Image: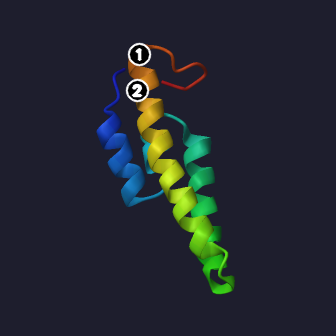
């Protein structure tokens, strides 16, 4: 099934990990959501201000790239 890379990226922009869930990578999506939550909590000790944007941007990039791979048929072990 075709996936829209732009939609996957926007979903991950709105909620970290949602784009991965859209792509069928449920575990990775939940993991990114939890990592973003922990990073948000770590903002109280400054490191979260660096970690949270890094996790969030990785989620957006990964969702877009994975959707493109799915569309090319090179999704590997990605659940469809």
- Which residue is at the far top? 73
Residue named by callout 2: 68
Contact between labelled residues 1 and 2, with CB atoms less than 8 Å apart: yes
Name the secondary structure under disc 1.
helix
User: What's the residue at 48%, 56% (across, down)?
Assistant: 16
- The residue that label 1 is drawn on is 72
Answer with left or right where residue 32 lies relative to residue 47: left
Identify the residue at image location x=62%, y=61%. Answer: 34
From the viewer's perspective, is 36 left or right of 7? Answer: right
> For the point 37% across and 45% down, which residue is it?
9
Taking depth in this image into account, of 29 and 63 the one nearest to the observer is: 63
Q: Quadrant of the N terminus?
A: top left
Task: Determine whether 17 is above or below 43 in the image.
Answer: above
Residue 49 image point, x, y percent:
58, 75
Residue furthest front in the image: 50
Query: Callout 1 environment at 10 Å: few (<14), some (14 to 19), or many (20+)?
Result: few
């Amino acid at each position: 099934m075709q996936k829209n890379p732009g939609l996957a990226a926007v979903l991950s922009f709105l909620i970290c990990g949602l784009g991965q869930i859209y792509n069928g990578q449920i575990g990775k999506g939940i993991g990114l959501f939890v990592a973003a939550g922990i990073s948000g909590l770590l903002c109280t000790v400054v490191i979260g201000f660096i970690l949270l944007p890094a996790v969030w941007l990785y989620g957006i990039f990964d969702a877009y790239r994975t959707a493109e791979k799915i569309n090319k048929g090179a999704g590997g072990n990605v659940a469809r």
